[in-house]
């Protein structure tokens, strides 16, 4: 049978396709802005046909209809990362959180988290019968390869990306044609604090370095201060519009990369249409599953690698919490530790944890004597390297507990330094 015949035979309406999901199935939804929102909406409309369908999702950028009150009988949410639309549900008992390094997820789908159905979004097939998964390859491609059934929303607006992003139509069980704009994430607000942090982080970046950048205002602020650098490269779990500007300005060339020279390597993308147009059919951008991009053994093959991520709290020993406020799970480990560890093993690697010194309008210090009760340690004190706030850079690797505490107090907000010094003196029995 030709691929066209296979495609036509498997073409269904969304209503027909979601009927293939059965009670007690485990359903994985395509990641982040790759979420097939139309299919998810139709699955939720069909809720009365299901009981106890487990929804596995990471960064959920859609409406999260399946975690709303009243859905408990039909759907059970298993979050691998807790985002804005799932936070209340996970902490309110309507969902759960599974701790897992991002790079391990494809393996989990083959072992302790086997998948019944993968709901994904793809480009229309090309002349050879291959559909690209576009903006989200990460766990989404592996989920499709492991699932018993793959239902794909075929969207003409999905960019066709290069690398290991393609599934042949024979690997997809049902096609639902529905084109809508890809979810966009506008640029974050960058204030004076983020700018100061960005400038300190940029001072740790040298010409020819390869970068990993997390999500949000701080990584974007760092990019603002890299305009005078030369020949930077990208090997990152994700990137956004800010990177495109640095490519256009000739700052990011990827020329000096020791792994995939000349190419930006990434697992998923989140940004505006500008980013999606940039990656469409662009051989400079190579996308791979997360068990490759985020694997510390792969990351370490990049000499001069710098990772920049953010966190919620740091204690005076350098233990970093990036995912909870006490027992309240607000996000997840994501790829933070994958990169911290890979970068640490890389030749001339540097891992940076950057955060504003305070939260809650300056009333709460993020540098604390002891992490809040119940907080998860995301990056351990043995893994931590640089901590940056708007007050400077603390280099913790190779430092004693006393030296670490003193370094961190130096970059804490001035309003909290006296209190932290008292804690130091109580703990170490000497003056700070
Ligand atoms: N005490 C109390 N509340 C705190 C806090 C603290 N120490 N630190 C942050 N918060 C609150 C904020 O006020 C905010 O609350 P709101 O949503 O009600 O406004 C919320 O927690 C999120 O904090 P914010 O600083 O706005 O988050 P961010 O968008 O800058 O993201 C992380 C910061 C740490 C949550 C995010 O970087 C993350 O999830 N990191 C882990 C995963 C990761 O690093 N992945 C890397 C590869 S992409």
Image: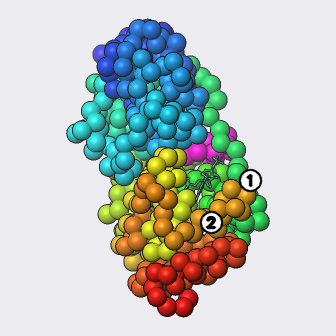
Q: In the rendered image, is residue 154 in sight? A: no
Q: Is residue 179 left or right of residue 104?
A: right
Residue drawn at x 74%, y 53% is: 189
- Mark 1 neighbour density, 10 Å: few (under 14) some (14–19) many (20 or more): few
The answer to whether residue 175 is above or below residue 260 is above
Residue 388 % position (x, y): 59, 72
- Please state the horizontal and vertical placement of residue 310, each as a whole percent of the image: 55, 61
Mark 2, mark 1: which one is toward the viewer?
2
> On the image, numbered disc 1 is attached to which residue?
189
Establish if 135 lies above or below 170: below
Q: Secondary structure at mark 1?
A: loop
Q: Looking at the image, which is closer to me, 281 or 196?
A: 196
Question: Mark 2 to mark 1: distance in Å?
Answer: 21 Å
In this picture, which residue range is highlighted in magenta?
Answer: 264-278
User: In percent of the image, x 42 and y 64: which residue is there?
Assistant: 379
Return the residue found at the far bottom. 431
The mark total stands at 2
* Quarter where residue 49 is shown: top left
**Mark closer to the chain start, 2 or 1:** 1
Residue under label 2: 365
Residue situated furthest right in the rendering: 192
Q: Is residue 406 above or below residue 161?
A: below
Residue 205: quadrant of the picture: bottom right
Ligand 1 contact, mark 2 (Cβ < 8 Å): yes
Q: Is residue 119 above or below residue 431?
A: above
């Amino acid at each position: 049978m030709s691929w066209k015949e296979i495609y036509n035979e498997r073409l269904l309406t969304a209503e027909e396709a979601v009927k293939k999901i059965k009670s007690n199935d485990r359903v994985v939804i395509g990641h982040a802005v790759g979420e097939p929102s139309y299919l998810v909406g139709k699955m939720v409309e069909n809720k009365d046909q299901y009981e106890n369908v487990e929804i596995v999702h990471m960064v959920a950028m859609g409406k999260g209809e399946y975690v709303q009150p009243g859905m408990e009988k039909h759907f059970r949410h298993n979050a691998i990362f807790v985002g804005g639309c799932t936070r209340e549900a996970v902490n309110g008992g309507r969902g759960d959180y599974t701790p897992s390094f991002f790079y391990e997820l494809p393996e989990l789908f083959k072992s302790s988290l086997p998948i019944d159905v993968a709901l994904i979004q793809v480009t229309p097939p090309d002349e050879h019968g291959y559909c690209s998964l576009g903006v989200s390859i990460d766990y989404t491609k592996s989920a499709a390869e492991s699932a018993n059934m793959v239902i794909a929303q075929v969207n003409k607006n999905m960019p066709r990306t290069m690398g290991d992003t393609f599934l042949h139509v024979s690997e997809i069980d049902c096609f639902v044609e529905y084109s809508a704009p890809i979810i966009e994430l506008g640029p974050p607000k960058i204030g004076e604090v983020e700018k100061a942090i960005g400038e300190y982080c940029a001072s740790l970046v040298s010409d020819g370095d390869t970068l990993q950048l997390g999500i949000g205002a701080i990584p974007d602020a760092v990019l603002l201060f890299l305009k005078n650098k030369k020949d930077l490269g990208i090997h990152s779990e994700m990137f956004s519009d800010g990177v495109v500007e640095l490519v256009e300005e000739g700052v990011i060339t990827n020329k000096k990369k020791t792994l995939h020279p000349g190419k930006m390597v990434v697992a998923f993308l989140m940004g505006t249409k500008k980013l999606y147009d940039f990656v469409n059919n662009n051989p400079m951008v190579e996308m791979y599953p997360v068990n490759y991009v985020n694997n510390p053994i792969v990351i370490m093959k990049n000499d001069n690698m710098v990772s920049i991520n953010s966190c919620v709290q740091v204690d005076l020993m350098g233990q970093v919490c990036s995912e909870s406020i006490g027992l309240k799970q607000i996000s997840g480990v994501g790829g933070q530790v994958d990169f911290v560890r890979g970068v640490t093993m890389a030749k001339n690697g540097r891992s940076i944890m950057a955060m504003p010194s305070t939260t809650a309008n300056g009333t709460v210090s993020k540098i604390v004597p002891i992490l809040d009760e119940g907080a998860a340690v995301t990056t351990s004190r043995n893994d931590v390297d640089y901590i940056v706030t708007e007050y400077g850079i603390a280099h913790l690797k190779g430092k004693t507990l006393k030296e670490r505490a003193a370094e961190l107090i130096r970059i804490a907000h001035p309003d909290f330094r006296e209190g932290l010094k008292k804690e130091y003196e109580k703990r170490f029995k000497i003056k700070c």
